[in-house]
Image (cartoon, rainbow, N blue to C red):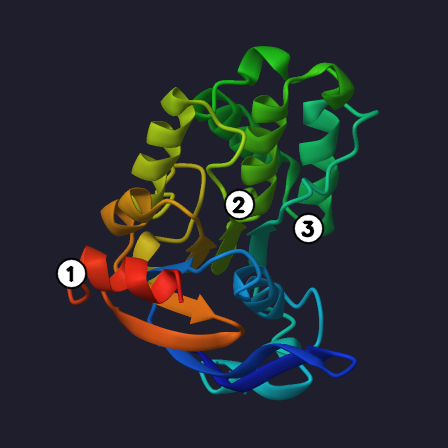
Amino acid sequence: MLETVNIGKRYGKIWVLKEINLTIERGEILVLLGSNGSGKTSLLNQFGMVSKPSEGEILLDGENIRESVSRSLGMVPHSPFLYYSLSIRENLDFYSSLFGITKKEKDERINELSAVFDFFNFLDRPLRHLSEGLVKRVSIVRSIIHDPEIILMDEPFVSLDRKFVELLMGMIRRGFDFDCLNRSPKERFFVFSTHFLERASDVSSKIGILDKGKLVALDDVGALKNEEIIELVNG
């Protein structure tokens, strides 16, 4: 189980998150909804250990996530965290090496995932020559190539055209169940944010709604009506 216990985050005197308490079971797909500035990115950054909480803690199976150094996580932030002077292959090779992936596993994963995300023929091109949408797909692959236990995605559909939005939605539904990865979807935690209610309801199993840094709703998909969700999102 992945859970937040009274998570709060502030910058100076301004609280961007306050008393966030939620739990996610393995295999669940949690989508975070909320208006701009509601705290979605800040909460994902807490899960991703991008910044330390001002109060509270995040637990993974009862253990503070910051002390679970053997547990892996993958994150797609707003910025791609990629090197534009390097090729796609060099970027993925570098990030794979950070997690001690064997050469055989690395090559298998790069080949399979680049084919699935439709950039196999661009593997040796520098990122600076590629479109924003293609870079986004590379960023998604970078986040999962080490077969993480926790997958976090901040607005993953942004910059993708309709074809790849549909492709990614199908992958999320199936829990990134690729042959080259070892974990099954039931072994993973998945959290993402989006502004698109239809996509959120279509691929997630649980919805969390944030407003002004507070979690105002958390329930299974279908338990909240669209009208209720829209009202809560709009504050």
Q: Quadrant of residue 30?
A: bottom left
Q: Quadrant of residue 45?
A: bottom right
> Percent x, y for residue 211?
46, 70
Dot 3 corresponds to which residue?
A: 100
Three-letter code, disc 2: Ile
Residues marked 3 and 2 touching at CB (< 8 Å)? no
The secondary element bearing badge 1 is classed as loop
Which residue lies at the image location 33% right of the left edge and 71% below the top edge?
Answer: 25
Crowd band around label 3 with a 10 angstrom C-alpha radius: few (<14), some (14–19), many (20+): few
> Percent x, y for residue 115?
47, 20
Which numbered dot is residue 222? Answer: 1
Q: Residue furthest top?
A: 121
Dot 2 corresponds to which residue?
A: 144
- Which label's residue is closer to the chain start, 3 or 1? 3
- Which label's residue is closer to the chain start, 2 or 1? 2
Q: How many marks?
A: 3
The secondary element bearing badge 2 is classed as helix
Which residue lies at the image location 79% right of the left edge and 28% below the top edge?
Answer: 84
Which residue is more in the foreground, 45 or 71? Answer: 45
Cα separation between marks 3 and 1: 41 Å
In the rendered image, the vertical position of residue 213 relative to residue 183, given as above or below: below
Q: Of circles 3 and 2, which is in front?
A: 2
Whether residue 147 is visible to the viewer of this picture, yes or no, is yes
Crowd band around label 1 with a 10 angstrom C-alpha radius: few (<14), some (14–19), many (20+): few
Cα separation between marks 2 and 1: 28 Å
In the rendered image, the vertical position of residue 233 relative to residue 89, given as above or below: below
Three-letter code, disc 3: Gly
Which residue is more in the foreground, 97 or 40? Answer: 40
Cα separation between marks 3 and 2: 14 Å
Q: Is residue 136 left or right of residue 218?
A: right
> Percent x, y for residue 119?
55, 18
Q: Of circles 3 and 1, which is in front?
A: 1
